Amino acid sequence: MTVIVSPFHLDERLAGPWPLQADATVDPVLSEGSPWERMAVIATALRDAVADVARAGTVPIVLSGDCVASLAVVAGIQAAGVEPSLVWLDAHGDVQSPETSASGYLGGMPIRQLVGGANRTVPDAVGLRPIDEADVVLLDGRDLDPPEAAFLAASRIRHLPLQPVVVPCPVVLHVDLDVVDEQDAPGLLFPVADGPSLDMVVAVLQQLIERNDVVAISLACTTSERSGPAARRIADLLVAAD
């Protein structure tokens, strides 16, 4: 297991602290440009770090401030010669596009980007090959905008309540801390009520790791004092289960 920290929320640096000590930190110099262009610089450096770790036969655990980092994680695993599936734990759908997003939040699009849609700036920069929709499992996703619900209903993405699943090919496991009910993970940017407890999320994660060939893990977590205990508990599980 190698912990890689990408200390960014979108294209803005975060000060930390992070729930695990970093073995490597990805912190490239960002020039002027659009947010997507700046995120492409971050993602390229992160892809290379993930690929190096994977080629060495070690599981990379990536900590970041958003879900966009998952694009680089998947691209890095692909660069290491593995075509992964994706298991995604999140309170949100993350299948927006620039045309469907009412808020315009760029962090709400990564699954759509991973399957070949939405803005292609970052996917093209990192050489991402789209994952087949049938190889994507979204667990929880309890807070969907109408366009997201419509997209998921028409897609082959499996959208399920939080539960352990078994996937027959190597898995990139992505966890957004907001999958945890806001009572157990307060202080997040986009908290969502009526979700699974921290205990339940930890139990499901444990089973997911035990039952699948997990080749990389991405954890999107904030660095506030209020959400820190939940982030640390999940991060500690990921390390212990490796």
Image (tube, rainbow, N blue to C red):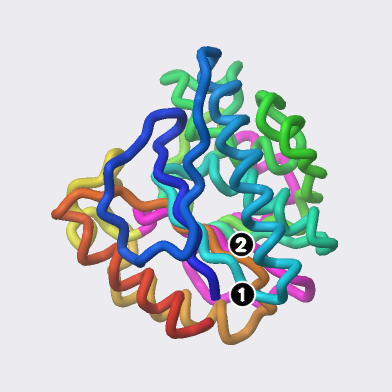
Quarter where residue 236 is shown: bottom left
Gap in angstroms between the C-alphas marked 1 and 2: 9 Å
| Residue 228 is a magenta residue | no
Q: Amino acid at mark 2?
A: Val
Image spot of residue 125 (x, y percent): 73, 31
Vertical order, 231 against 76 (above or below): below
Kindly check if marks 1 and 2 are in contact, taking CB atoms under 8 A apart as contact: yes
Instruction: Tell me the magenta residue range.
Output: 150-179
Left or right: where does residue 68 sit relative to residue 184? right
Label for residue 87? 2
**Residue depicted at x 52% and y 18%:** 31
> Which sits in the foreground, 119 or 191?
119
SS for dot 1: loop
Quarter where residue 215 is shown: bottom right
SS for dot 2: strand
Left or right: where does residue 86 sit relative to residue 229? right
